[in-house]
Amino acid sequence: MEFYRKNALLTALALKVPFRDRSIRIKISSLLFCCLLQLVPPALKGETGPGTGTGTGTGTGAVILQYHHVSAETPAVTSISPEKFKAHIETIITQGYQVMPLTTIVDGLRKGGNLPDKAVAITFDDAYKNIFTHAFPILKKYRLPFTVFVATNYIAEPSTQFLSWDELREMSINGAFIANHTASHSHLLRRQQSETQSQWLNRVEQEILTAEKALHKNIPENTPKNINSGPVQKLLAYPYGEYDTNIQRIIKKLGYVAFGQQSGAAGSNSDFSAMPRFPLSGIYSDHESFAIKLNTLPLPIKNQPRDPLLRTDNPMPRLVMSFEDGDVNLSNLRCFGPEGALEIQTLDKHRVSTRVTTPLPIGRSRYNCTMPVPGADPERFYWFSQLWIRTNIDGSWYPEL
């Protein structure tokens, strides 16, 4: 029964309690975290080696880490302290993980997942100046590659909060890939007043293309190619982690691979227009849970595109997962929603479904599903997360807190 308890913990640690009042959300998440932390297994053991070592064996997935601020003086919900960030890097190095460029990981996954075991990518959203001050020196010291997703309008003006083009160029020649986070970091899903659907979609496309042009102009050595033309891809992180199928079609049309903020390991069956990453800010930056997340694998399910933006008449979405043939025991699968454990219904030998029993709260929320990897020593887990976005009942948008 112990692995059931650990499985529940893993999902709870990834759970973003989606209350619109952030203070309530943080308090409840912290309480849940503290109560379950006693159940976390000891830090995973592994071979000591450099962070860019060879790893052990061949894997079928990779873990992509997402950071925002690296500072003790910025909002906790989007921050990790420099001390904790350093501890994360030291864990990666001492536990034998292989830090790889995100472009290389994407290329490997697109070719079927032929990557070293324990492959990891490090990413930062928003290009805050404290990345340069606190994270870059550590990454440079260990020669670790990383990706910075940049909202280019914020770089165009002198700022004490955001990086300059000179700083981005310095990082670029020292292991960083500078990627697209749109021009203005707006909520891409939200239409402006009196905006038609075609006008909205055109504006979203221009957000991406404007940022792409600025990146090409200011960091020419970092200019990405189309995803089909080589290992250097066009990469984009969705602002706020928000997207729907309309925006995903634009991503595919423009030749991008895109990343959300839903947790889980990335695999060859992941949706390349909505790749998962592990957010590592606030309470989710805890060292013990970080060690567990690093060692996860993608849940072996078939890619089934799902629109995360819910219709107003569908506040209790049903998630159906089709598993690949293989050595998996579906009775070990555990899924959680905002209010706790979800009931799982077996549809047939390879398919299950799950859903909440009460309407999801307004805003962003997730279903998180984990399952032990058979025969893994030390113990490790499969992990998958499904994003859901629910508007107000009348279809209007909730305020971002």
Image (cartoon, rainbow, N blue to C red):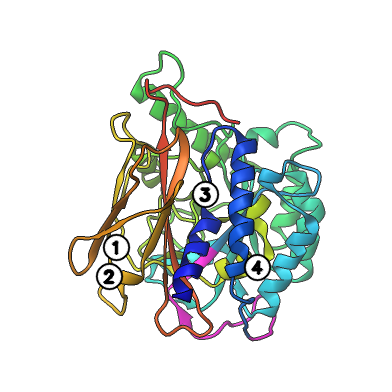
- CA gap between label 2 and label 4 equals 30 Å
Q: Amino acid at mark 3?
A: Gln
Q: Which residue is mark 1?
A: 302
Q: Position of residue 159 (x, y in %)?
A: 79, 34
Q: Which residue is mark 3?
A: 261
- CA gap between label 2 and label 3 equals 24 Å
Does the CB distance between marks 3 and 4 fall below 8 Å?
no
Question: Which residue is more in the foreground, 85 or 44?
Answer: 44
Q: Which residue is mark 2?
A: 324
Badge nearest the viewer, 3 or 4:
4
Question: Which residue is more in the foreground, 7 or 235?
Answer: 7
Q: Residue furthest left?
A: 348
Q: Amino acid at mark 2?
A: Glu
User: Mark 4 falls on what kind of element?
Assistant: helix
User: Mark 3 falls on what kind of element?
Assistant: loop
Q: Which residue is mark 4?
A: 288
Viewer can see residue 277? no
Mark 2 / mark 3, whichever is N-terminal: 3
Does the CB distance between marks 1 and 4 fall below 8 Å?
no
Q: Position of residue 204 (x, y in %)?
A: 45, 32
Mark 2 / mark 4, whichever is N-terminal: 4
Residue at image position (33%, 44%) is 357
